[in-house]
Image (spheres, coloured by chain):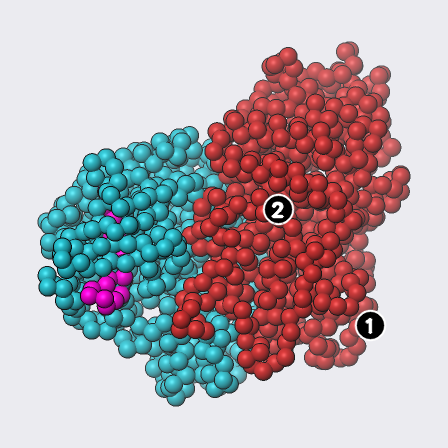
Chain colours: A cyan, B red
């Protein structure tokens, strides 16, 4: 257990972690909800084995039955109004969903499809007639549905999907049609077997005029078979999540009553007139989509929490497994006493804590925005959408990377299915893709920043964004970016000349760390604006300009989100009273900040914000921090509170 | 298809790639062998489906039958002497094995177990009596065996394994014993069901004296059942490779004839005397292990070739799939015309080419070393072992990273099993662990460099290495390192003062690129030596010193291997006559070199070898290179020659 500090003569005393207190802090406001889900998962832990032993067909049924059973406990309907049997608490709903990520992820995704996507769309896009007709059955698990948005030919570009819903005035119905094969709905969870209803997104056409994408409730199965005109194909075996029955849907002139248009934002009258309170079709589209932001918040949280299972296993294995003699001739060394092993795992542990607290902020904002009556605060909604997109991207990439590193850190034992990494890795893999491809989401974040979430510009696509930026004075663009205001905050913290401002502060000063991330954000974003303008000025095609600036666009968005994540962590630490708990969190917060700066230290050197010497000092500090966290690492993962029954892993624990 | 160069006014004309000629170049000397395997894989392509549709039990039988059938074509026995039905050509054997990576990887691993590990151990560690007794049946697939080295309690630290083989003079037998549960053999391919024989690695004890790890041929199954005293447990479901029946083995006083000791390097006489021509037990152990280097060469090649399947799919999908409008209002943009998409895939493509040529060098060296009679050239063997370890580590990490990036680049379609990424990802995952954990292998590389492969020091473990370095004058250590000689070569290429030598050369000059990588290698290695010495001087425990320097140790090894990889690529390009083929390869070679420097540009800046301006210029050059490769990217993956029947992927192609 020796970390060497003592031997080197320094008087470092690791903080004593009160695991229970730390767990309470992590669980936050919704501790009881999380405990309810934990208990339920532990009770049904056998599903983790069944995922391996059952056939795909059997396992799909098992997962479906489990989801229906869970709906009866109320834990899956927390986000719905109480009058329909829900809990009336969106934040609780997200907390419950996140915690499901400790268990089998097919169950989590099936819950997400039924209550988040299908039920969420009816709730958010529908009006009272839809709520009255469907929600009680949705919440009670009596009406299973699916969310038919994605098409084979259009993944993340939802606005371009091609399924049509044409109003037929003669019968007062909409006619749904899949015009060609690439316009089939694809990867639709619950479509292959279980869903009786679907919320279908289609281009609405009324009297020969197209009004863009709208959502409709469509019955797809009845009386034990498919509804006429609906064709279904099974997506077959997937890399993971094989307890979810994903499928493809084609519509061949399927007729539905006019009332089935989810008409909160737009409607078609009985005499065939299209009406909407939102005139701009782009704005209407993004407003509709924006109400579905809960899905992204949920997937980000699921990734962050699935990673906790991997970290719990790898850290605990690291203090059990010995390999090679190092400090002693007689006894082999514990893995976690190797500097490299600390380097591999502990910055990921710190990142996980950082993302946990960032996710807490997103979740709280979601709850606030959607608990407020009325739609008046457009900007708050757009900021929420941006924050949700960014946290989803970073949280799910974190999951992929962390699970992989933890698997490798558990060696051959990590490869056996019973030790959990197999399912963790396969099931979470698609998190980086669904609910929006991560790169597309980061572009969305960058677009929001460049236009300061102003509604006129929010709706522009990439091409439009480039043209918009090109049409403005550069100063105007830069000054209106959301990041520009950061400059003032940097100057407040670290006055001084351009060449030396970073040389004075202590590396462990949060203000310094934040100033570094703020500077990077402002600078990369201004850089994007400059590049876009210059490209156009040089006569390049706007698409080409975008393509060439794209890596900078992504870098700017990432810089922004990382700054938000660090702020969330710093803010959280500040709320904890002085003492060992706070010291523990401060160690993790420093490690997150410094390893984030370290990873991009080339950029900081290129932009005159790190000298070589200071850059090397940051690396030393990261290593030192890892050594300081080493003695409390097990406590830090135990505070996640993953129920032992879910860890399995006889070879690791 | 426009890369924008034309629009920007530059007169870049992409080279025309003769795909067939490039494929011949990649296939090299063993083109016919590779084509034989390609044809055979295409004929048995159904096994890719069967991996998904069969039960684990059925699929294990299917894979076993296929391997036996393949052995009859001769393609699996190319590395064995002709007198036993082999091909007498080790290089051909590696080429055949690598090409198997285009198909189902359970088949590849099952072949590796039978012919590489089991047969290879009998060939390399046994003598004529063992060859005569077993090899014809091994090569003909009539005697299936397994390789029982790894123990649950000791993965990569083979020297510490605990199974014992005690000589019983009374009966002239060895008695094999598993002393406790953690000393069971684990993850042993073919042990659960199919193997009748095992090569078992155990601590040899003769007359109360221990002589270290030796290998024995042990019959484990006969007459339809287990041999008495042998206990087997199935490892059960794994993340992937489920056509291979991995299992655990315990030995409870299992008796085998004295002749079953594989006695090429040591023997026990009838009167119970231990004898070996190699006196030093460490040297003996490493000499035995060194003969098994083919396994590492094969796994590295398998990783590199499995990645080719992923690159083929992702690049071809990138020129078929359109998403979002960018250069045109009417038509969406091809994925591969986005700068970011190029950035994500093309440096990996370049790295794959680089690793392919580096692997070709390893393979050739293997063939040369093992085709030479006698063991006289110890240093050549150690260099081969080091090169094999390093290429295996980089090649298998490349596979993990590349397959992941390619899956994400194919979006939701990449998640469906039929589109191949599922199996590619799950099956290759353990490549970074088996045949030596990659981090342990890189430590081996660093140790070899620090001691210049001198045999006295080669055998030292980490602890011994630290003590050894600490006991020398620093100058001695540094001057004897293999990397030190590089300094002279750097100075030849780039004379000039310390502050400016990197500012003169063109970024696309291979000499400049190589000088950069050589400088980094020499500098990181000297840095390790200095750190080890300083740590000891400061009174730290040697294990603690090692732990603290470990990230530098790994960085030095990586720097070394990357330099070898670039050299292999540069050397290959130099053999190609001037023309479009050479230009194509040169583009890839530049991209590999520059993206390698770019990835570590922080280090180069920290060490005064890149200015900010030049660092940024390298990033621009990488982007520019990607745009230049874009028009020929499909040709570059087509030249891999993955048979269309193996690509499946109806949704991607």
Considering the whole magenta stretch, tell me its main secondary structure: strand
* Residue A260 sits in quarter: bottom left
Residue shown at 53%/45% (left/top)?
B648
Which residues are the magenta region? A196-212
Instruction: Give percent across and percent down for residue A130.
Output: 14, 53
Q: CA distance from mark 2 to mark 1?
A: 46 Å
Tag of residue B643: 2
Confirm whether circles 2 and 1 share one chain. Answer: yes
Write down the residue under mark 1.
Answer: B492
* Residue A215 sits in quarter: bottom left
Query: Which secondary structure lies at badge 1?
Result: helix
| Left or right of residue B482, residue A345 in this image | left
**Label 2 vs label 1, nearer the camera:** 2
- Does residue B594 appear in this view? yes
Instruction: Please tell me which residue lies in front, B218 or B5.
Output: B5
Query: Which secondary structure lies at badge 2?
Result: loop
Q: Chain of mark 1?
A: B
Dot 2 alpha-carbon crowd within 10 angstroms: few under 14, some 14 to 19, many 20 or more: some
Instruction: Give percent across and percent down for residue B592.
Output: 65, 63
Marks 2 and 1, the one that precedes in the sequence:
1
| Left or right of residue A419, residue B347 in this image | right
Instruction: Give percent across and percent down for residue B596.
Output: 64, 64
């Amino acid at each position: 257990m020796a970390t060497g500090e003592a031997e080197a003569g320094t008087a470092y005393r690791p903080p004593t972690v009160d695991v229970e207190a730390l767990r309470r802090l992590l669980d936050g406001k919704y501790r009881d909800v999380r405990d309810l889900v934990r208990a339920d998962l532990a009770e049904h832990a056998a599903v983790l084995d069944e995922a391996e032993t059952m056939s795909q067909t059997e396992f799909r049924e098992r997962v479906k039955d489990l989801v229906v059973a869970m709906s009866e406990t109320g834990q899956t309907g927390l986000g719905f109004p109480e009058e329909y049997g829900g809990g009336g608490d969106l934040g609780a709903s997200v907390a419950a969903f996140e915690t499901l990520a400790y268990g089998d992820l097919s169950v989590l995704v099936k819950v997400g499809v039924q209550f988040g996507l299908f039920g969420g769309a009816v709730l958010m896009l529908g009006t009272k007639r839809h709520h009255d007709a469907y929600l009680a059955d949705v919440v009670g698990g009596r009406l299973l549905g699916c969310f038919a948005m994605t098409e084979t030919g259009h993944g993340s570009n939802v606005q371009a999907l091609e399924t049509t819903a044409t109003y037929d005035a003669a019968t007062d119905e909409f006619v749904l049609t899949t015009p060609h094969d690439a316009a089939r709905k694809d990867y639709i969870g619950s479509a292959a077997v279980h869903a009786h209803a679907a919320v279908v997104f289609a281009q609405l056409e009324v009297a020969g005029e197209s009004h863009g994408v709208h959502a409709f409730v469509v019955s797809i199965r009845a009386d034990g078979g498919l509804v006429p005109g609906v064709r279904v194909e099974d997506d077959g075996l997937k890399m993971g999540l094989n307890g979810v029955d994903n499928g493809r849907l084609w519509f061949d002139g399927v007729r539905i009553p006019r009332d089935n248009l989810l008409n909160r934002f737009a409607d078609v009258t009985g005499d065939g007139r299209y009406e909407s309170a939102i005139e701009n079709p782009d704005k209407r589209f993004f407003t509709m989509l924006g109400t579905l932001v809960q899905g992204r918040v949920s997937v980000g949280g699921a990734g962050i929490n699935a990673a906790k299972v991997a970290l719990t296993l790898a850290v605990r294995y690291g203090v059990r497994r010995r390999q090679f003699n190092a400090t002693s001739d007689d006894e082999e060394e514990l893995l976690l006493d190797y500097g490299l092993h600390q380097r591999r795992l502990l910055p990921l542990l710190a990142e996980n804590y950082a993302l946990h607290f960032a996710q807490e902020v997103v979740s709280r904002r979601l709850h606030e925005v959607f608990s407020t009556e009325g739609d008046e605060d457009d900007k708050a909604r757009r900021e929420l959408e941006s924050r949700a997109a960014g946290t989803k991207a970073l949280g799910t990439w974190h999951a992929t990377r962390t699970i992989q590193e933890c698997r490798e850190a558990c060696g051959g034992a990590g490869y056996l299915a019973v030790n959990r990494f197999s399912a963790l890795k396969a099931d979470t893999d698609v998190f980086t893709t669904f609910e929006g491809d991560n790169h597309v989401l980061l572009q969305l974040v960058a677009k929001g920043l460049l236009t300061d979430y102003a509604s006129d510009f929010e709706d522009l696509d990439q091409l439009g964004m480039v043209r918009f930026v090109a049409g403005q004075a550069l100063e105007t663009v830069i000054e209106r970016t959301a990041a520009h205001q950061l400059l003032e905050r940097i100057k407040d913290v670290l006055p001084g000349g351009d060449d030396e401002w970073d040389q004075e502060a202590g590396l462990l000063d949060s203000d310094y760390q934040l100033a570094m991330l703020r500077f990077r954000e402002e600078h990369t974003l201004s850089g994007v604006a400059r590049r876009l303008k210059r490209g156009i000025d040089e006569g390049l095609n706007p698409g080409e300009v975008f393509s060439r600036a794209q890596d900078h666009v992504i870098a700017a968005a990432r810089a922004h989100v990382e700054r938000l994540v660090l702020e969330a962590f710093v803010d959280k630490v500040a709320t904890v009273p002085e003492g060992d708990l706070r010291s523990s969190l401060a160690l993790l917060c420093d490690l997150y900040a410094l390893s984030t700066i370290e990873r991009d230290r080339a950029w900081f050197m290129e932009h005159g914000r790190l000298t070589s010497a200071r850059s090397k000092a940051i690396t030393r500090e990261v290593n030192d921090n890892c050594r300081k966290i080493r003695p409390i690492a097990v406590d830090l993962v135990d505070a996640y509170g993953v129920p032992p029954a879910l860890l399995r892993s006889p070879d690791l624990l």
